[in-house]
Amino acid sequence: MYIINIIKKIVASGLRSGINQYIFSVLVIGLTVLLCIPLSNPQGYHVVSYILLFAVSILATFMGIGPVFVASTLSALVWNYFFIPPHYTFHIDKAEDILMFGLFFIIVLVNGILTTRVRRQERLARDREERTNALFQLTKGLSRAVGIDEVLTIAIGEIKDNFTLDSFFILQDGNSILISSGRLQKEKILSQNEYVIAEWVFKNGENAGAFTNIHSETDYTFYPLLGTRVNPGVLAVKQEKLFKGVQKAFWDTFLTQISNALEREFLGELAQKARFLDESDRLYKTLFNSISHELRIPVATIMGASDSLVNSTHPANIQSALCNEIFTASLRLNRLIENLLNMSRLESGRISVRLDWYDINDLVNKVAEDLKDELKPFSLAISVSDNMPLVKIDYGLIEQVLYNLLFNATQHAPVASKIELVVRYKDGEMMMEVMDRGPGFSDEALKDVFKKPFRPEEAKTGSLGLGLLIIKGFIDAHKGSVIVENRKGGGTMFTIKIPTENPDIENLKLEST
Amino acid sequence: MNENETILVIDDELQIRRLLEITLSAHGYKVIHAANGKEGLIDAATHHPALIILDLGLPDIEGLEILKKLREWFSKPVIILSVRNSEEDIITALDNGANDYLTKPFRSGELLARIRAAIRAGENKNDAPVLQVGRLSIDMVNHIARKDEELLKLTSTEFAVLSLLAKNQGRVLTHQYILKEVWGYGYLEQTQYLRVFVAQLRKKIEEDPSKPKLLVTESGIGYRFGE
């Protein structure tokens, strides 16, 4: 039985070795024999056996086991036929020659087979080393990756490199619900069916899809990504057949590494979210408190003044003063509401930027006009450069930005000081600078003045501190930038940059000249 | 003062109706009000007001629908007074026949000025051959404009923009409307043309181009021809 098995193996591997190897082996043995013909004398035939042995050994270092077997047998027979006396027969006279022939046959066979086996071992070791190396590369890459997206990019790349397979990930959203569009793999949008399979895999923690028993009617095979605390999601691979044996073990290790890295990032993200929620909860409370306060003050003014107007008789000048108070309070309320509405538009992400061409002079004049009363105590210097082209902006949003900046200046700068507005155009960007001689910001405040509601300690009331957040949000919506710095000699300077294209007005100029 | 001009207020907020009644009556107008769209349409038909102030957010019919229905037969000015302040809402209302648009909260003085301008513009139908606005006179027949008898050098497009706005004095014209009227349908998106011409025109006709009184910008909406 054992021998039959070996022969089967040899035949099988022989077939694999290809017919060329057999022909080559036979040729080599034939050639060796021809070269040995001069040695065909009663003293030389032992030497011939060594030469043949040598030829077979050489063959064994690069041939399959089948051709080596054939070469061994052939060389034994040929040696017997041509060289062992009597020549040209398979008959052997001397008993020691029979022994020699037997030994030659065994040695040549063992030598050949052993050499090929060593070679196979060596190849296996090399494969193993390659896999270990691939895993090492993967682990190294994954451990350096920051953020889920980066982990995914590396994982997809490594799967492509090591298995030549296309893959994509479907991750859960943090509440154990799979996100239906494949994250990162943007071009791949999950079909309904694929989503169902992915969900099944995610729930059951087992493979499904192509080449499995479950939901095999799809192009992809889905593998669960199993973490120790949370399961990050599912991996879908487009493969030709399932992995087997060593390959499968390698694949499983690969998956585990990826799962672990994803889980790590996932938990990190969750923790960060929790921290963020904490923070926003605190902000919400602060904001809520200050809203209540800020609403109450003007309402109190309106109630008090109007009550006084209705219920008592005042001379005309007092009456008009009371009316003025009511009007001022209502303006303040209106500003508050406007800011709150803008903030909630920003928060809900419903800001849609409607870009169109505008003459920035128009906008600047409009804001200066709207703030005419507030600006009266200051000396306002507006400078819009002469080469200012039309700009492509959302008028309403930028109007609000400029309004907030100038209004802030009027709230913090000392009376009679200079407030400057400079608008320029440079390298495809509109640059707006607003400068005042107010108290400026503390170093601490400069850092996160655009990050959370800001109210300086010494500020007059009448603000929720949302103004700068709204500015930042609206400028971001324009893909622009806003920075704030303290000026030499005191005061603040806000610099806003908004990218804008150049208007196409070539044919216009022709007509107007 | 426009004695006994009737103004119809269609607004579902009682307080706004009361405020408008007090303010408008104090300025000599006769005020009728309706709390919803159906009433408003009936009142408009029975009282023939000189002007309608319309809220967009009514409980029964969308204000925009009322505006469209009114415009089937009502040619007098309609001013929209609404809390909706998005540019889209305003532009849609103007394109559907509203003469002007004011957002709540509003200043009474501003509202009164708009009412006066709208009524006056409706009265002297602007098909006179020569329009006289302040120091400016625009001769529609000969396509020339003068400022204090001095001939203004205007290109034909500049004149087209100027005369279109002047003919519609007191009314807000949206960018798209002006582009369509002056340049044609293919140019609806070419706001930059309009900007360049308005800037040029201002240099020629305004006292102080940085504080325009004639070609007034309506933020993000369009232009109006001022006093």
Image (cartoon, coloured by chain):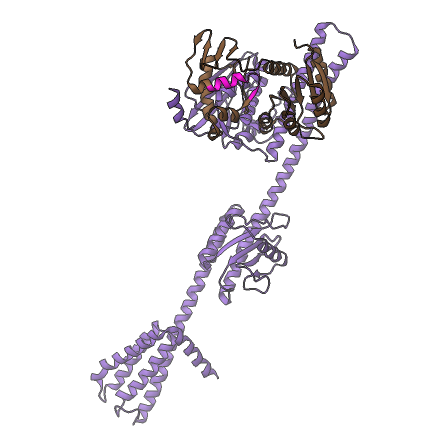
Chain colours: A purple, B brown
Relative to residue A145, is residue A342 drawn left or right? right
Image location of residue A87, percent across then percent down = 25, 91
Image location of residue A212, percent across then percent down = 56, 64
**In this orientation, which residue lies closer to the viewer: A198 or A124?**
A198
Task: Based on the picture, tell me whether residue B162 belongs to the magenta stretch.
Answer: yes
**In this orientation, which residue lies closer to the viewer: A306 or B122?**
B122
Res A406 → quadrant: top right
* Residue occupying the far right of the picture: A311
Q: Is residue A25 above or below residue A271?
A: below
Task: Based on the picture, tell me whether residue A131 belongs to the magenta stretch.
Answer: no
Q: Is residue A340 above or below residue A1?
A: above
What segment carries the magenta color?
B160-172
- At 29% from the left edge and 85% from the top edge, which residue is drawn? A78
- At 30% from the left edge and 75% from the top edge, which residue is drawn? A24
Residue A185 seen: yes
Image location of residue A246, percent across then percent down = 49, 66
- At 43% from the left edge and 67% from the top edge, which residue is drawn? A124
Determine the main secondary structure of the stretch shown in magenta. helix
Image location of residue A253, percent across then percent down = 52, 60
- The quadrant of the picture occupied by the C terminus of chain B is top right
Q: Is residue B9 above or below residue A354?
A: above
Residue A385 seen: no
- The quadrant of the picture occupied by the N terminus of chain B is top right
**In this orientation, which residue lies closer to the viewer: A349 or A497?**
A349
Res B34 → quadrant: top right
Q: How many marks?
A: 0
